[in-house]
Image (spheres, rainbow, N blue to C red):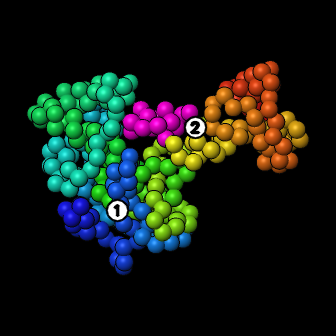
């Protein structure tokens, strides 16, 4: 851990006392947690990136396009010692996710013939689970401390990338109050998706099935229907199970369990591109 802390200190640009600490958590590895109670909006850390790489042009081979590929190419051409401290994908052997990564990694390695194939595959794996995307211009940005957060579908913090002119600094800021010892988490996927979609994406890209509170216990707020009881307010499934037919209304408070016919009508409206049907 000493070498990791040394590398983090070299990259850090945030003054003042440390508001974070690294702990080992079974099943997660290294986890960044709050060193004290942190109000919403607190700047936890800011660091210089290990790698900033422009995304390949549309005319480039498909296997080289994307933020992760840009960072992997940069690491192949100019290795960064601290990047060796970062994790790579944890796909289960023989799983669909592992097979998909193997296909992408093989194509990437083939597009980098002047570099060792195993090394190319390794750096693509590291970049694929740690890269941050930035726009204007499009680039992949790889940090050290900002690669240490665990995932949560209701995250406690978020990472921003500064301007290219300013060095593409990576900053971690809380988006709600965080208690001392609580993990500083970010969302690895777009949060405004149903649970089934988020879980599938996380499994495919990061090799784990999410079991956060939102996935396991919270109402499915991104699926919303007009309440069957009051006919006005929005209602959502009480659980994230894709087949959950019990809806709770956020206006009248009623919970309604739907029969097959009523549920089928809602599903048809949900899948429709006609806004009138959805209403």
Which image quadrant for residue 121?
A: top left
Residue 203: which disc?
A: none
- Residue at the image position 25 percent from the left and 56 percent from the top: 50
**Disc 2: which residue:** 195
**Disc 1: which residue:** 22
Q: Is residue 129 left or right of residue 120?
A: right
- Residue at the image position 38 percent from the left and 46 percent from the top: 27
- Start-end of magenta stretch: 196-210
Q: Can residue 8 be found in the magenta stretch?
A: no
Does residue 185 appear in this view? yes
Q: Is residue 267 left or right of residue 27?
A: right
- In depth, the one of 183 and 198 nearer the eye is 183
Where in the figure is residue 241, as x and y percent of width and height? 63, 33
Which image quadrant for residue 245?
A: top right
Where in the figure is residue 139, as x and y percent of width and height? 33, 48
Query: Relative to residue 139, is residue 175 depicted above or below?
Result: below
Quadrant of the image containing the N terminus:
bottom left
Query: Relative to residue 99, is residue 9 depicted above or below?
Result: below
- In depth, the one of 213 and 277 nearer the eye is 213
- In depth, the one of 136 and 255 nearer the eye is 255
Q: Residues within 10 Å of mark 2 (few under 14, many from 20)?
A: many
Quadrant of the image containing the C terminus:
top right
Where in the figure is residue 30, as x and y percent of width and height? 33, 55
């Amino acid at each position: 851990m000493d070498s990791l802390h040394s590398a983090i200190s070299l990259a850090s640009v945030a003054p003042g006392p440390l508001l974070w600490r690294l702990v080992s958590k079974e099943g997660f590895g290294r986890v960044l947690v709050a060193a004290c109670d942190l109000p919403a909006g607190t700047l936890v850390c800011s660091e210089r990136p290990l790698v900033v790489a422009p995304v390949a042009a549309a005319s480039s081979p498909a296997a080289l396009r994307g933020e992760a590929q840009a960072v992997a190419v940069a690491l192949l051409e100019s290795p960064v010692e601290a990047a060796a401290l970062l994790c790579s994908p944890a796909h289960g052997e023989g799983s669909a996710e592992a097979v998909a990564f193997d296909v992408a990694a093989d194509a990437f390695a083939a597009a980098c013939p002047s570099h060792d194939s195993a090394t190319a595959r390794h750096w693509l794996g590291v970049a694929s689970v740690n890269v941050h995307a930035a726009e204007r211009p499009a680039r992949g940005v790889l940090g050290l401390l900002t690669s240490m957060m665990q995932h949560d579908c209701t995250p406690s913090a978020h990472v921003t990338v500064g301007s290219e002119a300013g060095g593409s600094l990576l900053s971690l800021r809380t988006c709600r109050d965080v208690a001392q010892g609580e993990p500083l988490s970010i969302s690895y996927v777009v949060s405004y998706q149903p649970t089934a979609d988020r879980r599938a994406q996380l499994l495919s890209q990061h090799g784990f099935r999410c079991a956060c509170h939102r996935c396991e216990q919270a109402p499915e707020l991104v699926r919303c229907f007009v309440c069957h009881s009051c006919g006005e307010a929005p209602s959502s499934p009480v659980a994230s199970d894709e087949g959950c037919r019990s809806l709770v209304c956020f206006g009248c408070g009623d919970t309604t369990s739907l029969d097959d016919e009523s549920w089928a009508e809602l599903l048809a409206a949900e899948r429709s591109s006609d806004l009138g049907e959805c209403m």
